[in-house]
Image (tube, coloured by chain):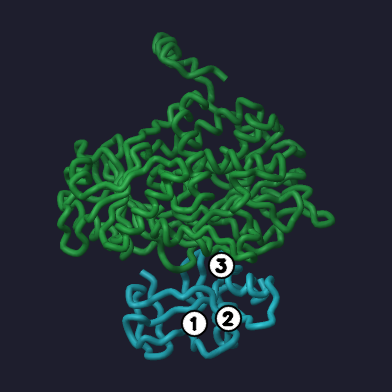
């Protein structure tokens, strides 16, 4: 792999950019691998990357039905934060946030991580108490957040309307080291690094079945034939239930559509991420100038990657109250992704009833921020059978009643 | 926009009138059941990519619960029917079979 650098740009500029090599290879699948990851999204590729980097397991294939990063990795609103209430959540999300800080250097790929700060607005007295509690919890967890006054919110976000007609801003939970990153680049950077380690990234290949012998996995049936493995990681977000059905177990998961939209690009007007959970909306401004807007998920099961119009309307209506200046903006694009929701709104990183099959799913509406931490922990789980990062996120927590209840702590927005 | 006919009041209701209530025909376990049965009842869901039986409430209408058979892959609605039924009635199964010849209720 040729390293990307300022020197490389100068070198290629001098020879009409003829020397750039492909960022990752597209090889034919081998007969078998030490480990197979299903799903070449951020979480799947990060898992493969850390299997290689931390555990030296490089005979790995990442199998993807569509194209690399074409699912929720390319469909989210790119928010990165770690201000969760529960210790287990804070640990994995803070690990991820920390890894994002050096990801561009680690991968030699510019993921445009921008620690621009994230504010979660408190717009009811319940929310004020809730976020103050989260700030205290974060202090104990070593996650730097603070509860700030409305005046400080206005200072950070001048375009905000503090005295909204329905929900005035009463304060905010501020994480200065949160921010955004370029979502596609995260997948591309990991793919390039994995390919460089000799891993095979096999796109446009659908897994159609999981072959088992004596209760243990021996490989996967794909649209390009059988591929053998004794270790299978299922990292397919919205389609987790479909893959689990192939492997022969059920999940406490339902798949629903979550939508996002961007406005036409405008001049820089907001240099942080603002989330308003009471009114269901969150917004940031991309480097291109578009206002990137997301809201709540639909309430019913759906695999179509498009959601209900009225949810977009509700989200925009709420944000127009909070940011009156966006009322004249035109919508440029809108899209949906299929998110995998668990009962406690926390992910599942776990062994499964089938020996050798591991599952990483249930990130629901908030997986992007967790990609490197999730990959780190899940790779450790797959390689060693245990990871302190993922220990609390097992499938058995539902039977045992050990929920990691973030549905209250995090509101709807992730 | 999703439109379902409420079998209780006969209104063709937009989804803004309706509240989704999750998977239908769950078997409710009571005292004396095993942990596995409780776990399945409380958390495990079929979550199919295809035909799905689900509960809806005509929240901003007659207020009654009803059930619907719907495809999660195409958003096609096959039928809506009374909530006072422990399993999909024959006319609903026929309506699905007419549109999905390879579908069976076990799948």
User: What SS does tag 1 mark?
Assistant: strand
Residue drawn at x 16%, y 62% as measured from the top left? A165
Q: Residue A277 in the image: state x and y as whole percent.
A: 33, 57
**Which numbered circle lies on residue B67?**
1
- Contact between marks 2 and 3 (CB within 8 A): the answer is no
User: What SS does tag 3 mark?
Assistant: loop
Real-space Cα distance between discs 1 and 3?
16 Å
Q: Earlier in the sequence, mark 2 or mark 3?
A: 2
The chain identifier of the residue carrying mark 1 reads: B
Real-space Cα distance between discs 2 and 3?
17 Å
**What residue does disc 3 label?**
B50
Residue A406 in sight? yes
Q: Is residue A97 above or below residue A407?
A: above
Residue drawn at x 37%, y 49% as measured from the top left? A135
Drawn side of residue A366 relative to residue A130, left or right? right
Q: How many marks?
A: 3
Considering every residue shown, the one lying at the far right of the view is A214
Front residue of B19/B104: it is B19
- Contact between marks 1 and 2 (CB within 8 A): the answer is yes
**What residue does disc 2 label?**
B25
Real-space Cα distance between discs 1 and 2?
9 Å
In the rendering, what colour is chain A? Answer: green
Q: Earlier in the sequence, mark 1 or mark 2?
A: 2
Rendering quarter of residue A241: bottom right
Q: Residue A126 in the image: state x and y as whole percent.
A: 31, 63
Rendering quarter of residue A61: top right
Drawn side of residue A165 relative to residue B71, left or right? left
Q: Same subunit under labels 1 and 2?
A: yes
Drawn side of residue A123 relative to residue A29, left or right? left
Instruction: Quarter of the image for the N terminus of chain A: give it.
Output: top right
């Amino acid at each position: 792999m040729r390293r990307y650098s300022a020197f490389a740009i100068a070198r290629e500029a001098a020879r009409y950019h003829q020397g750039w090599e492909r960022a990752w290879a597209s090889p034919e699948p081998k007969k078998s691998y030490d480990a197979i990851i299903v799903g070449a999204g951020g979480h799947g590729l990060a898992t493969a990357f850390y299997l290689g980097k931390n555990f030296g397991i490089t005979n790995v294939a990442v199998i993807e039905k569509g194209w690399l990063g074409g699912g929720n990795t390319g469909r989210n609103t790119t928010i990165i934060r770690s201000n969760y209430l529960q210790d287990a959540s804070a640990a994995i999300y803070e690990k991820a946030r920390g890894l994002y800080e050096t990801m561009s250097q680690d991968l030699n790929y510019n993921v445009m991580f921008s620690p621009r700060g994230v504010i979660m607005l408190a717009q009811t007295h319940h929310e004020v108490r809730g976020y103050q509690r989260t700030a205290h919890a974060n202090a104990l967890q070593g996650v730097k957040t603070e509860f700030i006054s409305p005046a400080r919110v206005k200072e950070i976000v001048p375009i905000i309307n503090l005295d909204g007609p329905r929900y005035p801003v009463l304060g905010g939970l501020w994480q200065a080291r949160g921010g955004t990153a370029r979502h596609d680049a995260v997948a591309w950077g990991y793919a390039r690094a994995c390919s460089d380690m000799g891993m095979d990234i096999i796109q446009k290949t659908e897994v159609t079945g999981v072959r088992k012998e004596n209760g243990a996995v021996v490989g996967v049936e794909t649209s390009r034939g059988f591929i053998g493995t004794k270790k299978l990681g299922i990292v397919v977000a919205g389609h987790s239930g479909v893959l689990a059905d192939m492997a022969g177990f059920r999940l406490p998961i339902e798949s629903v559509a979550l939508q996002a939209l961007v406005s036409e690009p405008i001049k820089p007007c907001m240099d942080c991420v603002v989330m308003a959970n009471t009114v269901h909306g969150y917004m940031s401004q991309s480097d291109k100038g578009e206002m990137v807007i997301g809201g709540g998920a639909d309430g019913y099961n759906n695999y179509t990657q498009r959601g209900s119009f009225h949810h977009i309307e509700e989200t925009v209506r709420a944000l127009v109250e909070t940011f009156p200046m966006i009322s004249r903006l035109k919508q440029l694009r809108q899209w949906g992704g299929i998110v995998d929701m668990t009962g406690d709104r926390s992910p599942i990183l776990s062994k499964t009833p089938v020996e050798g099959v591991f599952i990483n799913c249930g990130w629901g509406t908030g997986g992007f921020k967790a990609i490197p931490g999730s990959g780190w922990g899940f790779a450790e789980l797959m390689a060693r059978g245990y990871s302190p990062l993922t220990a609390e996120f097992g499938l058995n927590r539902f039977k045992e009643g050990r929920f990691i209840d973030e549905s209250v702590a995090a509101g709807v927005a992730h | 926009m999703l439109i379902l006919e409420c079998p209780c009041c006969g209104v063709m209701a937009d989804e803004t009138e309706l509240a989704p209530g999750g998977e239908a025909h769950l078997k409710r376990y009571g005292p004396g059941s095993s942990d596995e049965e409780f776990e399945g009842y409380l958390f495990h869901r079929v979550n199919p990519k295809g035909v799905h039986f689900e509960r809806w409430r005509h929240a901003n209408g007659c207020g009654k619960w009803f059930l619907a058979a719907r495809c999660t892959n195409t958003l096609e609605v096959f039928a809506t029917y009374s909530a006072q039924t422990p399993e999909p009635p024959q006319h609903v199964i026929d309506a699905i079979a007419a549109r999905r010849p390879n579908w069976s209720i076990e799948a």
